[in-house]
Amino acid sequence: MAFRHPLKLHYQPGTGEFGVSVPKRHFKRAVKRNLLKRRVREAYRLNRSRLGEQDYDIFIYYIGKEVEDYERIEKSLVALLDDLAAR
C-alpha cells in the first residue's frame, strides 16, 4: 500500500488489472464520483509505462474530500507509480 494525497494505492504482483474507487460518503452525486474516476483512469493510462515490464494488480482509492483538478491527481499518481517501480 502506498499513499500520496489524494490517492491511496493498493497493489500486488499479478496480471495487470486496474480499478478505481471514489467513496459515496464524500461525494454524494454520481457525476462528481464519475468525474474523479475518469481523471484517475486517464492519468493512469498516460503514465502506466512508468512501471516498465512489471505486472501489478492495482487498485486506487480516492481519499480526498474535495474534487481535485487533473494536474494534482496526475502528479500524485506519477509519484505513486514511480515509488512502485522502484520497489
Image: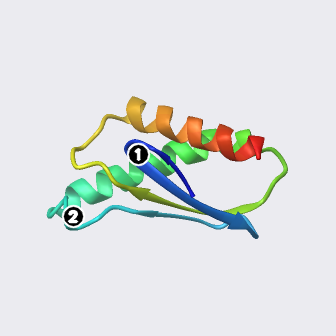
Label 2 CA crowd tier, 10 Å (few <14, some 14–19, many 20+): few
Task: Please tell me which residue is depicted at 43% across the width and 49% down the height of the picture.
Answer: 7
Q: Which mark is residue 30?
A: 2
Horizontal side of residue 64 vs 66, given as left or right: right
Q: How is the image coloured?
A: rainbow
Horizontal side of residue 28 vs 6, given as left or right: left
**Residue to which mark 1 is pinned:** 39
Q: Quadrant location of residue 30?
A: bottom left
Task: Please tell me which residue is depicted at 34% across the width and 54% down the height of the picture.
Answer: 63
Horizontal side of residue 72 vs 34, given as left or right: right
Q: Where's residue 62, x and y in %?
A: 37, 54
Horizontal side of residue 17 vs 86, given as left or right: left
- Residue at the right extreme? 53
Q: How many numbered marks have been drawn onto this rendered protein structure?
A: 2
Marks 1 and 2, how far apart at CA: 14 Å
Task: Please tell me which residue is depicted at 28% across the width and 65% down the height of the picture.
Answer: 23
Q: Which amino acid, by three-letter code, is at mark 2? A: Ala
Viewer-side residue, 81 vs 3: 3
Q: Does residue 51 sit above or below 59 in this rendering? A: above
